[in-house]
Amino acid sequence: IADAGALMFSQGDGGLSISDTWGKNLSSSFWHDSLFTAAFQKTYTQGKPLTFPMGEHDELLNGSSVWHELDSCIIFPLKTFKRVLGALCLVRRKGHGTFSYLDIEMINVLASQSSISIENVRLYQNIRDNYLRTIKGFALAVEAKDPYTHGHSENVMKYAVVLAKRLGLRESEIDKVKYAGLLHDIGKIGVSEAILNKPGRLSPGEFDEIKKHPELGMRIVKDVPFLQSLSPYILHHHEFYNGQGYPDHLAGEGIPFGARILGVCDAYEAMTSDRPYRRAMSMDRATGILAENKGVQFDPDITEAFIGMLGSARNTSPEDTVTGIAL
């Protein structure tokens, strides 16, 4: 139908943003010619297509430095029932003729389909943004009860994301590990602040209360549609590789892989942070404990990957790290 085209959107300041282009030997300056900027603004404002040459709009050709290269140009608004999203601009070069009525009908169908796709992408992005804000709100609610764990969940999330990438997980799995890291302690909302902030050793009864938080967290997220997939990671992040953890005494490969990642990251972050009952450990001491507990508390391969990740961070500049871990 066309020799070249561009997807155009309005910037916040009223300017023209070129999202994507196709066609050979056409620079970005071509699409910012006065013909396209003026026609886009008219289409965007009125919500109606423009075609050139057409007579009534030919004043927009004045001052154009590219019109002499073209036989025809058409700009279709990309719009929903509520608003104009942008415009689809198509051109035919000299000698290739003008767009026919049949071409225009076909372009109209294409523009309508494109508008639906663009709006769906924007809705999806809005849902994701709201999703992340909700998760962060949950995490902050937990940490408000326990000042010693301020930033703990976010740090676990950062460790887990970098580790998941290092282990070669798919993007969808990395997202699940990311959000589960942020929410892994959400169940502590249901644990007494006196227990969470106790400066000394917990009694067996108090520790039993603490041990309820993975199941409480799972119950909180399992009925929320966009959080359901995180529930196995939250429920099982305190399982031990040898089966001596909680709540279900799962062992080895029976523990969800994402939960095994969180188990290592959670333990390391906790050991290297101040707690009411002790000062933070050094990186070397904490990694030593991780290594001693490979195959006991922690998945051996995941633990090795995590320790290797920390080691590589020693030679990485600060701007290339997240919480001290190499990106």
Image (cartoon, rainbow, N blue to C red):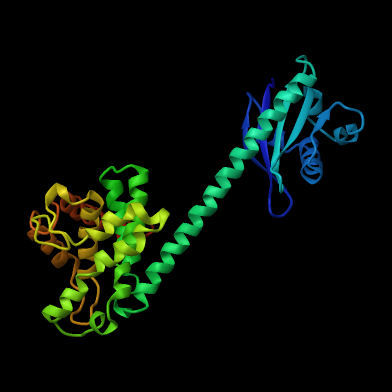
For image coordinates 25% across by 65% down, the residue present is 214
Across and down, in percent, residue 283 comes to 19, 66
Residue 269 in the image: above or below residue 310:
below
Asked whether the viewer can see residue 91, the reply is: yes
For image coordinates 79% across by 16% down, the residue present is 97
Q: Is residue 79 left or right of residue 245?
A: right
Residue 326 in the image: above or below residue 196:
above
Residue 102 in the image: above or below residue 320:
above
Occupied quadrant, residue 231: bottom left
For image coordinates 72% across by 55% down, the residue present is 13
Q: Is residue 135 left or right of residue 26?
A: left
Judge by depth and name the residue closer to the eye, 107 or 95: 107
Across and down, in percent, residue 11 comes to 68, 50
Q: Residue furthest top?
A: 95
Judge by depth and name the residue closer to the eye, 101 or 286: 101
Q: Quadrant of the N terminus?
A: top right
Across and down, in percent, residue 31 comes to 71, 35
